[in-house]
Image (tube, coloured by chain):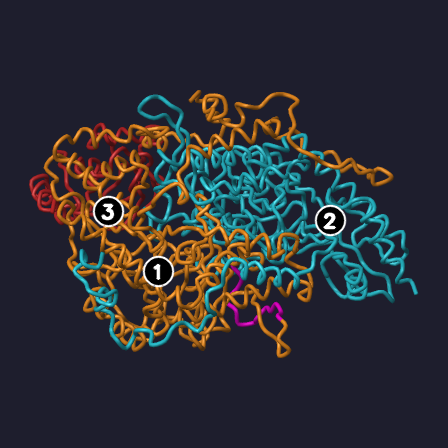
Chain colours: A cyan, B red, C orange
Amino acid sequence: MLGRCGATTLDDLYADVPDALRLKEPYRLPAPMSEPELERYFADIASQNRRLLCFAGAGFYNHYTPAAIPSLMARSEFLTAYTPYQPEISQGTLQYIFEYQSMMAELTGLDISNASMYDGATATAEAMLMAVNSVRKKRRILVASTVAPAVQQVLATYAAGPGITIEVIPEDGGVTDRTAFEAMLGAGDVAGVIVSQPNYYGIVEDYDGWADTCHSSKALLIMNCHASTLGALRSPGEWGADIACGEAQSLGMPLNYGGPYLGYLCCRENLIRKMPGRIVGATTDAEGRRSFVLTLQAREQHIRRQKATSNICSNQGIMTLHAAFYLALMGAEGLRKVNTLSYNAAHALADALCDTGMMRLKYPDKPFFNEFAIETIEPLSADALLAACLKKGILAGVRLSDSSILVAATEMNSPADIALCAETVKSLKS
Amino acid sequence: MEKIYYRSSHEYIKADGTTGYVGISEYAAKQLGVVTYVDMPEADDEFGAGEEFGAIESRKAASDLFAPVDCTVLEVNEDLESNPKLINENPLEAWIMKVEISDPSQLDDLMDQEAYDAFCASEQH
Amino acid sequence: MNKALYSNLVFDLSRKGCTGYSLPHYDYGKAAGELPENLRRQTPPSLPEIDEPSAVRHYTNSSNNNFGVDTGFYPLGSCTMKYNPKINEAAVAMAGIAPLHPLQPVETVQGALRVYRTLEKALSEIGGMAEFTLNPFAGAHGEYTGLMVIRRYHMARGDEARRRVIVPDSAHGTNPASAAMAGFDIVEVKSMPDGTVDIADLDSKLDETIAAVMMTNPNTVGMFEKGIPEIAEMVHKAGALLYYDGANLNPMLGIARPGDMGFDVMHINLHKTFSTPHGGGGPGAGPVGVRAGLEEYLPNPRVSELPDGTLAIDFGADAFGRVGAWLGNFTVYIKAFAYILSLGSENLMRVGPLATLNANYIMHSLSDLYEQPIAGPCKHEFVFDGLRDKSTGVTTLHVAKALLDYGFHAPTIYFPLLFHESLMIEPTETESRPTLDAFIATMRKIALEASAEPDTVKNAPYTTPISHPDEDEAALNPVVTYRQLCAKQI
């Protein structure tokens, strides 16, 4: 082979690399490991990770992964495929993305979905950029303080480059202060308003009239929602929102210590050309066969470069297959059941924890879905509670403050799990 | 009397006194392929000569559009919203915006038909 | 394969009353009160009703319409479609991270954090950098992250004037798009005929308004940027930082490190250089490395090592911000890490040379029939400017589509924009000689057919599930959901 290349050694092919830059020694990395050795290595890694009984949420939820999904995701025709730029040999990928888009549009009650963003937080940031690009000459974004802190931080990061001004709408009693919102909107120059549903505390807020108020000031309403809860809660489309975005991990994606998850982004039809990311469209081929292709590519970076709707190239790819397959298996009925079980589990847990006499709901008068903020009553502290539960292998929730935690429950938590958690808290009564 | 002028970025302006119709040339339309979308300005928008006033897309390409002269938008061609392919059918008739020309002397900085045709021929390399 | 029955959309296979789920019937005790009416969903979502076997058949048959690296060769330039070792997948299964919640106490996730930290250090060794963040979800995301580090760096120096970034005209579209998202204006620098950066042009454009220069090395036509030590010096002298787009890192493994070349910030595409599967478009990962002095600007959250050797999560005050809800696409790190451990130092050292050998072998085997615009040995990839014989009107697009009938994916076409009929080929080091020879033979056949019977080539492909889809119509009148498709009756 070297002969054909007109070279004698492999080094000849690098003759143009200055000697001063060449590596003088091999990488200071271990010697190669055989497969059995690798399996031992990772088994050792696993021994340093601890599976806990999960009552934590805060944007990532422990829902069941149907057994059929992993085997499908492992099919190498899907897993090792490239981006479907050559539609003739990528109809598999393109078709499941089209199904995913259809299902997310249904779930959010909006017209259009793209083929995914990275995660819920970055999807929300891109929704913010969409609003600024769609509403001419306006550069203010209002964000409810009840949007998850991680999402708010990502929004602030993405706002910095384009010089977008973010203002936080204060909360009052665990929900967004509507009066403050209207005053801030009235000050003008607002391109979009971002709210969460449920909010960070798990509370289902009443956004009645918000869309109309936004629209009368020519601002867009953006709702950040956990995908699974859309099966039971009033959809962004039903609230009159223009853009829906958020995390689709709750569609049975394993927690996997943070990823890969799936950011979804949906919008009304009139915003389709401002939508970032890939979009799959249906068409026909030369023989009239139904065909799927990447469409509206002129929005994207490989054509539009610095004027593109986003820099996004690779997205979460095969995770959209997970989402589509999950929603297909669940159907509306299964999704409703997941939500009912999760809702009931969380409410049973809230009751059981309050019944110990050592905790009380932080916002008792607000309706919550499958997550709630709960306070510890002195002398019990949040840290003491979390530590005690951890000893029993329970992740009781996420710390909110010295004396409060955020607790979630799903269909993965049995009545016995809930009893165990409550018992553990009760045992701290001494 | 209407006369057509071209910008080096392939926009044309058909000017008659202080009124002009701005679109893209036949050469540009051919390069672009089937036009799928035109991002148009709004009435009353003002642009300086050389300022970006919109964009035009095909399946595989996108180009910004630059104003040939200082102008104010009087009207945009609503037909292009539902049927952007009109530009491929007859680019010189399927204008994008109708404008009021602030300074007609700027037209002299543009190319006439002959000069533009020669320009396009040389661009083919 | 039963395409006729199962290849329709999953909605077409929907039958009322069918279910595919399995959920427990837990009774949690007294019924929880319902949510107020106006907070509840009014109209149920229209989702399929399908049983598990039918759904499985649908997606299985659908996968038969797909081509992956496990199916055949992808000569895609700039994509580094190397084989995805299955031990990577096994490592994910073994590592025990599936049940780990991101916000679990750090003492319960030391194994996961150990993977993160060790991979970060391995990438630092390979890249010649001081520290990496693994957090960015993809290459473009890494570019954005790297540019935001640079932006923060200048702000910390009190230098507000640096609002522009220089990008080669041959650069991948994500470069200027990422710079724009980071709030920079773009300045293009010209390329020489051989695709390398025009140093004189660069010199004329460097001034105190430039925050960074983005480059890749080798460049997008597979040529090593010989001017690199000089370029780095120029850029630094002008007060700017030099950014390395890691898409073309593969030929540098075992040869040189971007950090040693003078790059200050870089990203790596784990789904390219480090063999993690492309998944039809993701998930990938775009870790970002920085030279010493820039570490504090890396995004939150960060993984740090305590004096006693345990690992912790930090939120640094000087970080430019946050680019995701947690630490990124974790299973992708495990796969890349397994790859590095599997190859070990000695085999990682051979990746570059073997990738370069394969690319040169193909180039020399086809340059009599395809136009080779740039002389000299290439690195991991090279560009042809279409066929030598263009007289019959056969274009790069035709060649690409013709390849599909032979069980090869097409090369990258019409990128970079430097040549009108760009055909960019990158075989990677994981392709055997028989595969390369088969590809060469096919490309030769197509080239000869293009001259002798051009229509055969122009009307390809013939054997793929679909052929010549109407992409113009798809863009003119987008149909992007099942609801729209039914309305249009496609």
What secondary structure prevails in the magenta region?
loop
Q: Position of residue B52 (x, y in %)?
A: 29, 48
Q: Mark 1 points at which residue?
A: C250
Tell me which residue sits at (18%, 48%) in the image: C366
- Looking at the image, can residue B60 be seen? yes
Pair 1/2: label in front? 1
The chain letter under disc 2 is A
User: SS at mark 2?
Assistant: strand
Tell me which residue sits at (32%, 41%) in the image: C409
User: SS at mark 3?
Assistant: strand
What's drawn in magenta, residue-wise? C311-323
Is the C terminus of chain C in the top left, top right, bottom left or bottom right quadrant?
A: top left
Q: Quadrant of residue C244?
A: bottom left
Residue C433 falls left or right of residue A223 = left
Q: Mark 2 points at which residue?
A: A371
State yes or no: residue A318 in magenta: no
Q: Distance between the residues labelled 3 and 1?
A: 19 Å
Pair 3/1: label in front? 1
The residue lying toward the viewer, choosing from B39 and C412, is: C412
